[in-house]
Every structure is written in C-alpha cells, then in structure tokens.
Amino acid sequence: MWWPALFIFDGMVDYWSVASACMAIECVIFVWQKYLPHWKLSFACSLVGNLVSFSIGTVLGAILLLPWHYFVDPLLGGTFHPINWCVTIVVMLAVSIGLEALVVRLATKMPVRKFLPVISIGNLLMYVFLLFAGAAFGSVEFGPIPTGTF
C-alpha cells in the first residue's frame, strides 16, 4: 500500500546529492534574505531541518497515506494510479515542509510566515527533481488512467 511513498523515500536516498544541493540553496537564501543572521545558524537549521524532515517525514507521510490507500485505491484501480502519485507527493511535501518549518521555528523563534517560502522552494525543488529523475530512470511510471473509474 505504501509504494508511491517508498519510491519517493528511495529517490531521496539515491539522490542525496540533490537533497544536499537543495539544502545549500535554502542555506544561502536564509542568509541572503537576512532571515537568519549568520551562516552557522543557517547551515544548522537547514541540516537539522532536512534530517528531521527526511527521517521522520517520510515515515509519517507514509503512515498518513494509509487510510487514503485503503479506501481510495480500490476505487481508482490500484496503488500506482496517477491520482495516487499526486496525493502522495502533496502529502509528503506538506509533511516535509511542516517538519522543517517546525525545526527552524524552534531554533530561531522567528514567525513561520517569514521563512516558509524558502523552505517550500527547497523542498519543492527536491520533489520535482525526484519526479523527473524517477520518470527518466523508470522507477516512477504513470500508467494510463483506467476507463470507468470516475
């Protein structure tokens, strides 16, 4: 039942260098836009936020998707239906952004609305890359939508 979520997790493990690049982008923007006062704090927030997001977020996202897959998969005709992929990406992205925002908020006491766009862009870049890389290398396949499922 968790397959789309596990493919995303696997992609994050396989493409850790891209995750590192997205984290570096976040770090630079944090300091450049003066959200955080210095590089050390920016790097620490990006690193810890991304580690928490990766370690807890992927598991939490997969667990949160269980009810969706249990009730909706039979209606859509399977776990790998394109709608399931979209829901998986949205839920896991939201969990990832939420956890990372929580870490930065706890570390800096800054209002979330100030830095949420930076975290969102960094995470969105990662998920877009994973989607394209998965499609290019065959780990993500969008099959045809079965007729009569809507």
Image (cartoon, rainbow, N blue to C red):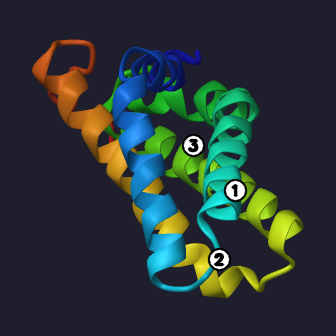
71 or 35: nearer the viewer: 35
Amino acid at circle 1: Cys
Reading the chain from its start, which is encountered first: label 2 or label 1?
2
Estimate the spatial distance between the alpha carbons at disc 2 and disc 1, rounded to whole Å: 9 Å
Query: Looking at the image, do the residues carrying marks 3 and 2 touch, with CB atoms under 8 Å apart?
Result: no
Estimate the spatial distance between the alpha carbons at disc 3 and disc 2, rounded to whole Å: 26 Å
Give the residue pinned by disc 2: 36
Residue at image position (48%, 85%) is 33
Q: Position of residue 77 (x, y in %)?
A: 38, 22
State whether residue 147 appears in this view.
no
Give the residue pinned by disc 3: 92
Residue at image position (52%, 17%) is 6
Q: Is residue 40 left or right of residue 27?
A: right
Q: Position of residue 87 (x, y in %)?
A: 47, 45
Residue at image position (19%, 35%) is 132
111 w.r.t. 97: above or below: below
Name the quadrant of the C terminus. Answer: top left
Residue at image position (39%, 58%) is 25
Give the residue pinned by disc 1: 45
Q: Position of residue 141 (x, y in %)?
A: 21, 20
Reading the chain from its start, which is encountered first: label 3 or label 2?
2
Q: Which mark is residue 2?
A: none
